[in-house]
């Protein structure tokens, strides 16, 4: 397919602005090099993006069981609500009395999400999950510093099954990372945790349900050990979809959390963003929150207030406001009973699909899963030479978005499936059928899977060449 | 009401049994009884689509959307060509995940590659990443790229956006580097103070062009000073201005960053926005986040992939330079469509009109007794001072549906004009201000 720069011709363009109605001005420090941008008519721009769109797999192109990503349906009413000019047309620094609806939306969203998570306060400044992790860790850092233990408490405990963002966020917040090995059941090894926790522990980062799709039933012991050592507990909300409305992180013993509104609360992923990663905390950390909180005054009006000992700001203004608006519309739609219903159905769908596959695909961990499950294809690879990657690429030819591959790192040939609650029984049945077919192909004709995909716009790409000889932009000079 | 679950209750029971359970409570057998939520969440019951829409419309209706805006300070109202909204709301672009499965994600990958190219064109730099959260985090990430064992002081211009400064400072609190501000003088960086602050511990100098007060910095000399001390220079740029002003590549910046919101992204009460980041060949391997690269598939056909992933958190974990994962891909696509629709000529025209209208506004306000505070050249923002309280002027404008400049204190106002402001609107604004000041 042509690049946008390879289309059009010099002199073509769109007519967007009228002539200027005031005198021109000149600058002393002018741009010297020619600015090269596409020269295209509106027709050509439109066609170009239509071509690109054909080569994209969206949530409604088919089944999207990408583990840990919660690719649920993105309701259209949320999009319509966020597009209202009364939201999209607001300048972030308008006088507060002219943005009362926006402040009320932030205030109500905070209250609802605190109720769902068992937290007391929340900031919407973080723009994504990893950004939320960084923010939450800064709260932990500020807390220890205030107590005069900042110098001493320098370590963050992270299970080896954690998302890569956890250790990376801890490092960005200036902490040393201590990896805690998982037990054979995929959960936190309590003894190892006990050994690691001590006077230098700033906190623990944990996902529960964890990244192998299991609810760690020792959760109270885990948070108890960390608290006992004087550390705080951070909840990575990536997997909240499994338990929302059933059990709350605040009641599991967590002090600070982030949510991924673009996972659990149905806002779309946009091909990689924007997301929103609000951070919630217990009251004793609230004074450290970044940015400003939308507070309700006694007369029913709203105002922004900066927390007393705020760590500062992690983003400009108030975060990805329109994403929060979409999540709020979703919360209104589901309500008190819809939230646990969604969680329960997500867990049901995962267990149903798992059941349909576990006789031929070995599961990494036995037992009831939460919203996702992990297969371990090591044995299949040994027997047939077909890898997790090959199966994933085979799914592409079958029109299904592959599950998450090679994660968590503690499972070697991992494929992680998260069907979400918004998939019908037939979709799950068809996916199971395709996976069983791929298994048969693996046994009978493994070469076919090494070659897959063959029906996609491009075939397997040479990633080594891309990294060794980086071509990272189109060059007009060539 | 609905939770967007297709399966009926009966179907769900059937599935539950097929999965080997006899009751829904068994699904949560691992959750200790003592911590399970007793009763239901203290939230209202779910609602159907129509009442949800009405609730959202009611909230939106409680905000005032100004038809006439003279306020910038980090968020700018520019014209967004209709095609930008049309393309950026196409469902597949909106709903796709990060393009890790390259074979079915060429559309997203190519759009990012094209975006990266356009950012390099605008900034004059060699390599762009696929975006970060916003201009402020782009600045903070850029500073983190420069910090080393010996050089761990970050110098930030006091003439830069205070919101951006706050974010850099907060990131420095995280990574333990030293944050120092260079005082502002006459709306720009005080170069005398900068030369006093520069040392062999300076990792980088962050300067914003144009400054928060709209003034043009002498970037050539600031670059020379930073480099003379062995430090990197990070330029925070307004992307529209780059169509007419000397580029970071031309004055020798090491990293160019900025807020991409002016490129076809609505003000939206502050977000989602777009942080762009571009660097020299020497620095690009330190860029955080995703980068798309060109390659070939098995049949030799051109294709695109996420590349240089060995820099990133999912590979390097605690050794990664940044934790960023999700970025602002859809906003980057908006920027690319915007730049394609405007073209080089259109963008230059927008930049020229912004400057022309801001200068016309400045003269008109001067006639109303609001005098510009700074002396140097400015782009599309400027500060006025007067003895009349800023609030009185802004209130009078607000009554006529005009959002005036941002009050910096009781007397000073930071104004902005863009191609959206007409001569009539500017004249009216000045006339209203004149009534208040009584000049």
Image: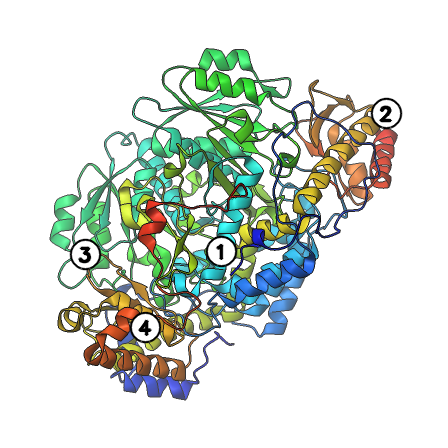
Tell which circle, 1 or 2, labels the residue nearer the N-terminal end.
1
Is the residue marked by circle 2 packed among few (<14), some (14-19), or many (20+) residues within 10 Å?
A: some
Q: Secondary structure at mark 1?
A: helix
Q: Where, by quadrant of the figure, is residue B213 drawn?
A: top right
Is the residue marked by circle 1 packed among few (<14), some (14-19), or many (20+) residues within 10 Å?
A: many
Q: Secondary structure at mark 3?
A: loop
Q: Are marks 4 and 3 in contact (CB under 8 Å)?
A: no
Mark 4 or mark 2: which is in front? 4
Q: Chain of mark 2?
A: B
* Above/below status of A346 relative to A140: below
Mark 3 or mark 2: which is in front? 2
Mark 1 vs mark 2, CA separation in Å = 51 Å
Q: Chain of mark 3?
A: A
Which mark, by number, is residue B367? Answer: 2
Mark 3 vs mark 2, CA separation in Å = 71 Å
Whether marks 1 and 4 lie on the same chain: no
Nearer-the-camera pick, B29 or B251: B251
Q: Are marks 1 and 3 in contact (CB under 8 Å)?
A: no
Q: Secondary structure at mark 2?
A: helix
Which mark, by number, is residue A394? Answer: 4
Q: Secondary structure at mark 4?
A: helix
Left or right: where A138 falls relative to B83? left
Quarter of the C terminus of chain B within the rendering:
top right
Q: Which residue is mark 3?
A: A188
Mark 4 vs mark 3, CA separation in Å = 34 Å
Q: Are marks 1 and 2 in contact (CB under 8 Å)?
A: no
Q: Report x, y in % for residue A311.
A: 43, 35
Q: Where, by quadrant of the figure, is residue B161 drawn?
A: top right
Q: Which residue is mark 1?
A: B110
> Taking the image as drawn, is residue A418 in sight?
yes
The image's colouring method is: rainbow
């Amino acid at each position: 397919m042509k690049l946008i720069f390879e289309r059009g011709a010099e002199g073509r363009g769109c007519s967007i602005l009228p002539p200027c109605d005031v005198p021109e001005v000149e600058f002393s420090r002018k741009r010297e090099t020619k600015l090269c941008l596409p020269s295209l008519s509106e027709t050509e721009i439109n066609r170009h993006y239509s071509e690109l769109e054909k080569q994209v797999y969206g949530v409604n192109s088919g089944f999207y069981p990408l583990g840990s990503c919660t690719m649920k349906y993105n309701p259209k009413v949320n999009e319509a609500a966020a597009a209202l000019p009364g939201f999209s047309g607001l300048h972030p620094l308008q006088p507060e009395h002219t943005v009362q609806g926006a402040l009320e939306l932030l205030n109500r969203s905070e209250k609802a999400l605190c109720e769902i998570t068992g937290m007391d306060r929340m900031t919407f400044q973080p723009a994504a999950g990893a950004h939320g992790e960084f923010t939450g860790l800064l709260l932990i850092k500020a807390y220890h510093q205030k107590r005069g233990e900042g110098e001493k408490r320098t370590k963050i405990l992270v299970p080896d099954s954690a998302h890569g963002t956890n250790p990376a966020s801890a490092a960005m917040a200036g902490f040393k990372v201590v990896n805690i090995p998982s037990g054979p059941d995929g959960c936190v090894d309590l003894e190892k945790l006990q050994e690691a926790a001590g006077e230098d522990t700033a906190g623990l980062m944990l996902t529960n349900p964890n990244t192998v799709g299991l609810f760690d039933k020792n959760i109270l012991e885990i948070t108890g050990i960390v608290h006992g050592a004087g550390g705080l507990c951070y909840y990575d909300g990536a997997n909240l979809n499994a338990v929302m409305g059933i059990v709350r992180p605040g009641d599991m013993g967590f002090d600070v959390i982030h949510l991924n509104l673009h996972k659990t609360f149905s806002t779309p992923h946009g091909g990689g963003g924007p997301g929103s990663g609000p951070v919630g905390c217990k009251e004793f950390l609230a004074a450290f929150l970044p940015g400003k909180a939308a507070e309700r005054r006694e007369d029913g009006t709203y105002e922004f207030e900066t927390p007393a000992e705020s760590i500062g700001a992690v983003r400009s203004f108030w975060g990805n406001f329109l994403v929060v608006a979409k999540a709020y519309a979703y919360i209104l739609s589901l309500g008190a009973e819809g939230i646990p219903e969604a969680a329960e159905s997500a867990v049901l769908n995962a267990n149903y699909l798992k059941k349909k596959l576990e006789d031929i695909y070995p599961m990494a961990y036995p037992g009831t899963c939460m919203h996702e499950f992990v297969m371990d294809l090591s044995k299949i690879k040994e027997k047939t030479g077909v890898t997790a990657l090959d199966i994933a690429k085979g799914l592409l030819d079958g029109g299904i978005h592959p599950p998450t591959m090679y994660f968590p790192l503690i499972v070697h040939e991992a494929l992680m499936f998260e069907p979400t609650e918004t998939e019908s029984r037939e979709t799950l049945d068809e996916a199971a059928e395709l996976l069983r077919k791929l298994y048969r192909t693996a046994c009978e004709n493994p070469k076919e899977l090494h070659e897959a995909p063959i029906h996609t716009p491009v075939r397997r790409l040479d990633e080594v060449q891309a990294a060794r000889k980086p071509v990272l932009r189109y060059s007009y000079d060539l | 009401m609905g939770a967007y679950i297709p399966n009926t209750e009966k179907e769900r029971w059937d599935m539950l049994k097929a999965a080997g359970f006899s009751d829904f409570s068994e699904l949560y057998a691992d959750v200790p009884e003592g911590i399970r939520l007793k009763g239901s969440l203290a939230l209202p019951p779910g609602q159907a689509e129509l009442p949800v829409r009405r609730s959202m419309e009611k909230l939106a209706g409680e905000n005032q959307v100004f038809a006439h805006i003279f306020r910038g300070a980090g968020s700018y109202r520019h014209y967004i060509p209709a095609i930008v909204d049309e393309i950026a709301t196409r469902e597949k672009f909106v709903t796709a995940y990060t393009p890790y499965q390259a074979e079915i994600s060429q559309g997203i990958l190519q759009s990012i590659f094209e975006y990266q190219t356009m950012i390099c064109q605008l900034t004059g730099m060699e390599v762009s990443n696929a975006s970060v959260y916003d201009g402020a985090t782009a600045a903070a990430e850029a500073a983190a790229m420069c910090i080393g064992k010996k050089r761990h002081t970050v110098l930030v211009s006091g003439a830069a956006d205070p919101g951006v400064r706050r974010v850099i400072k907060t990131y420095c609190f995280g990574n333990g580097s030293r944050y120092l501000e260079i005082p502002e003088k006459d709306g720009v960086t005080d170069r005398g103070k900068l030369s006093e602050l520069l040392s062999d511990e300076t990792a980088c100098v962050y300067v914003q062009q144009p400054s928060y007060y709209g003034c043009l910095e002498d970037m050539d000399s600031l670059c020379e000073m930073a480099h003379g001390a062995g430090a990197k220079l990070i330029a925070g740029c307004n992307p529209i201005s780059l169509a007419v002003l000397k580029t970071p590549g031309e004055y020798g910046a090491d990293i160019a960053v900025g807020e991409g919101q002016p490129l076809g992204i609505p003000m939206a009460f502050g977000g989602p926005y777009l942080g762009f980041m571009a660097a020299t060949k020497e620095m690009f391997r330190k860029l955080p986040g995703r980068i798309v690269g060109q390659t070939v598939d098995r049949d030799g056909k051109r294709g695109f992939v996420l590349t240089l992933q060995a820099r990133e958190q999912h590979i390097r974990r605690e050794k990664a330079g940044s934790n960023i994962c999700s970025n602002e891909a859809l906003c980057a696509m908006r920027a690319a469509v915007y730049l394609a629709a405007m073209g080089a000529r259109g963008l230059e025209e927008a930049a020229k009109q912004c400057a022309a209208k801001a200068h016309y506004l400045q003269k008109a306000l001067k006639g109303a007794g609001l005098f510009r505070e700074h002396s140097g050249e400015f782009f599309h923002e400027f500060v006025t001072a007067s003895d009349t309280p800023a609030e009185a002027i802004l209130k009078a404008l607000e009554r006529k549906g005009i959002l005036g400049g941002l009050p910096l204190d009781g007397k000073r106002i930071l104004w902005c004009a863009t191609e959206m402001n007409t001569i009539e609107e500017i004249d009216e604004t000045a006339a209203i201000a004149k009534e208040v000041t009584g000049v």
